[in-house]
Amino acid sequence: MTSASVVWWVGLAAGLVGAPLLPGLINRVKAFFAGRRGPSLFQLYFDMYKLLRKAPVYSSVTGWLSRAAPVLTLAATLATLLLLPLAGVPSPFAFSCDIILFLYLAGAGRFATVLGALDTGSSFEGMGASRECQFSMLAEGVMLAVFGALVLMAGQFSLGGCLNQVSSAVWSQQATALILLLASFYVVVLAETCRVPVDDPETHLELTMIHEAMILDNSGVDLAMIHYAAALKLWVMIEFGVMLLLPVMANGWITLTVQILCVFGWTASIGVAESIMARYRFLKVPHLLAGALCLGVMAVVVLLLFRGVARI
């Protein structure tokens, strides 16, 4: 095993172990702004440990989809993490056009959660699943715009090729496009991970729930897997955004350390955003995502113009 592959495996372990810290960090930042002490950074670890010791309870009207949904959601999220290049090192599981598989896996986890919610027969969970499908459809358009811009910039469909090509030279030449992509992707992270202003994971009012409404009937081990999958998805999305921001350095260990620190910094910025703004009305969320889509399309246009000028 080469030193580069060791860096990648260490980065993978950091994601698997450190992902539950991210929701705790967001809650601590929000508590700081509210003048409270707040829960422990490790609260999600304690919650998952408690849930893992309990057996799940199923309604008499549920089928096998409700039992399989948490496992499928976690498996899809883990697969997306396995495809990510870390610290400038391509994933050992990477292949040509793996960026398409990454997009499908990101959608597959959400699809499994929606199917599990519909299988319960609960009207509230069906309502949450409907909202999730509507907003995810809009968010996926933004994701396609971001990924299209990356492919246009790198000239290849490999996930590692798209993310590892970001360097200081690329920033000096295409800073405008990268800034637009970062702004667009930041909104996608909030939408895909069910954060304010799109959703509020701490709400307890069913009429305002999206993600939490879909998991009302889950308990025990199933709920622990759902919580861990949500934290892991937050880590994957932020790690992806950090690799858009940071140029790849010569030393893999330094790159990995800086990336992990930036992941926690990005997470803290989400806590700040949630502290200074309220959740949007559901009618306003499409406007937010439409604005993010416009930013992504503008990045594509800037890249096309840059390519045309370079040919001249």
Image: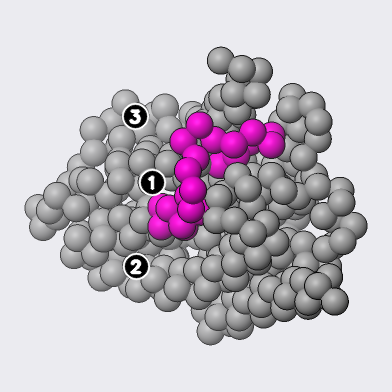
Is disc 3 surrounded by few (<14), some (14 to 19) or many (20+) residues within 10 Å? some
Provide the residue span drawn in magenta.
84-105
Instruction: Label 1: state its secondary structure.
Output: helix
The residue that appears at 60% across and 28% down in the rendered structure is 8
Examine the rendered structure and indicate whether residue 77 appears above or below residue 115: above
Q: x, y percentage for residue 34?
A: 74, 53
Task: Characterize the magenta stretch by its predominant secondary structure.
Answer: loop
The residue that appears at 43% across and 45% down in the rendered structure is 77
- 131 part of magenta stretch: no
Residue 274 seen in the figure: no
Q: How is the image coloured?
A: one colour
What's under tag 1, amino acid-wise? Ala
What's under tag 3, amino acid-wise? Leu
Between 296 and 301, the one lying in front of the other is 301
Cα distance in 3D space between marks 1 and 2: 18 Å
Cα distance in 3D space between marks 1 and 3: 20 Å
Among the two numbered marks 1 and 3 on one chain, the one whose residue lies closer to the N terminus: 3
Outermost right residue: 172
Cα distance in 3D space between marks 3 and 2: 25 Å
Examine the rendered structure and indicate whether residue 57 appears above or below residue 282: above
Residue, disc 1: 76
Residue, disc 3: 52
Instruction: Label 2: state its secondary structure.
Output: helix
Outermost left residue: 60
Between 31 and 25, the one lying in front of the other is 25
Tag on residue 280?
none
Among the two numbered marks 1 and 2 on one chain, the one whose residue lies closer to the N terminus: 1
Residue, disc 2: 129
Of circles 3 and 2, the one toward us is 2
The residue that appears at 85% across and 76% down in the rendered structure is 312
